[in-house]
Amino acid sequence: MDNIKSLKSLCIEPDNENKHFHCRETTQQKLINTSFVVLDYIDGVKTKFGGSRYIVKIRLDDGTEQKFFTNSQEIKYVLGKVKEKNAFPVRVTMLAEGSRYFLE
């Protein structure tokens, strides 16, 4: 039993090609009119609701990190532009008009 190794002792690096966010999931609806910091996102995620979804990792003002799924073309566009400018993290506010979600 003494020669059993732990994962930590093996120094195995995380798989950067297969990113995951290990935090509580929330919904866009719960974030309406809330300001928060977008930390990162994963694009092209396939879910039971369809492909090409984004998972967005955020930090609320109380310091907790959460994630939400989106298929909003407006949110995807904004996140892509922020990534192009290498501007993460970025503070935003989630807004909605009917079933349309967007960031400001």
Image: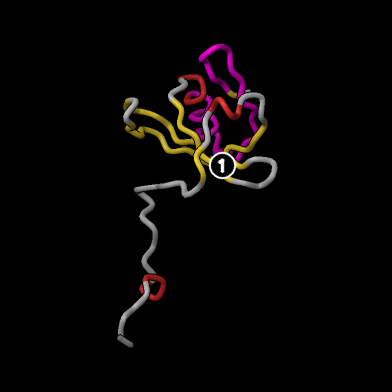
Numbered circles on residues, count: 1
Mark 1: give few (<14), some (14-19) or many (20+) Cα within 10 Å.
some
Looking at this rendering, what residue extends furthest in the top direction? 98
Residue type of the residue flagged with mark 1 = Leu
Looking at this rendering, what residue extends furthest in the right direction? 61
Q: Residue at x 51, y 47 (%)?
A: 23
Q: Residue at x 33, y 87 (%)?
A: 2
Chain part drawn in magenta: 77-102
In the foreground, 48 or 61: 48
Left-right relation of 85 to 49: right
Asked whether 83 falls inside the magenta stretch, the response is: yes
Q: Residue at x 65, y 27 (%)?
A: 93
Left-right relation of 17 to 76: left
Q: Quadrant of the C terminus?
A: top right
Q: Quadrant of residue 29?
A: top right
Scheme of colours in the image: secondary structure
In the foreground, 22 or 15: 22
Q: Residue at x 47, y 49 (%)?
A: 22
Establish if 4 lies above or below 24. Answer: below
Locate residue 42, reporting x and y percent: 43, 38
Q: Quadrant of the N terminus?
A: bottom left
Asked whether 65 falls inside the magenta stretch, the response is: no
Secondary structure beneath label 1? strand
Left-right relation of 88 to 17: right
Locate residue 50, reporting x and y percent: 32, 25
Establish if 76 lies above or below 26. Answer: above
Locate residue 81, reporting x and y percent: 52, 28
Locate residue 72, reporting x and y percent: 47, 21
In the foreground, 75 or 66: 66
Q: Which residue is mark 1?
A: 39
